[in-house]
Image (tube, grey):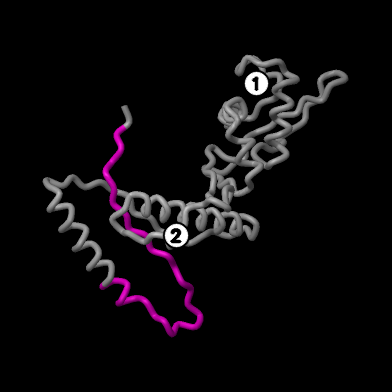
Amino acid sequence: MFDVAVIEDPAAAEVSLDPMRAKLLAALAEPGSATSLANRVGLPRQKVNYHLRALEKHGLVELVEERRKGNVTERILQATASSYVISPMALSAVQPDPERAPDRLSARWLLAVASRLVRDVGTLITGATKAQKRVATFALDGEVRFASAADRAAFAEELAQTVTTLIGRYHDENAGAGRDHRLIVAIHPTVRSE
């Protein structure tokens, strides 16, 4: 089971967004059968089986084991990941495009850039999983408290200058065997959960 899986297929995204199926996915962090899940989610076993077949068809759950109980075979399933992210590729016709309105101070542009990040990294993870390889990435996450809007603006300007200098130092346009990497640096107000 993966910690996070990326859903790129529109049909799989639709299946995962059904509230009951999302509940079943969460319950299947640990292996379970339709019978054991039926009691937990308050549905008849047959209805749970219907939802499980849809989840299995789209690769969101997988068979772990089959157990014979008399004349019946009990299928034990488990979610393929602990959590899922739906890639903007699932809505390819309307996915955000940061090139449409590149305004580095716009929250909507930041959201379009973040969507591209999810799409690109999701595609890389999918390919790497098939090839049984790892994806070389790096992320930095932190918080900073600014005393004023002027301090925030000064920080953003200094950060931009520092990153631009660093890129200039390491970017080699003539590296034939080199591989391009996308760099995203973002800053936004922290969202506090209640």
User: Are dots 1 and 2 in contact, CB under 8 Å?
Assistant: no
Residue 121 magenta-highlighted: no
In the figure, 193 relative to 137: above or below?
above
Q: Position of residue 115 (x, y in %)?
A: 46, 52
How many marks can you see?
A: 2
Q: Nearer the viewer, residue 78 or 97?
A: 97
- CA neighbours of label 1 inside 10 A, class few (<14), some (14 to 19), many (20+): many
Q: Locate residue 128 relative to residue 175 in the image: left or right.
A: right
- Asked whether residue 93 is in view, the answer is yes
Q: Which residues are magenta?
A: 165-192
Query: Residue 167 location, x and y as percent?
Result: 32, 72
- In the image, residue 63 sits, relative to residue 37, either above or below, namely below
Give the x, y percent position of residue 175: 45, 82
Identify residue for label 2.
137
Q: Spot the residue most to the front.
A: 101
Residue under label 1: 37
Classify the position of the N terminus by image quarter: top right
Q: CA distance from mark 1 to mark 2?
A: 37 Å
In the structure shown, which secondary structural element does the residue marked by tag 1 occupy? helix
Q: Position of residue 164 (x, y in %)?
A: 28, 70
Q: Pick out the residue farthest to the bottom.
A: 174
Rendered position, 47 above or below 94: above
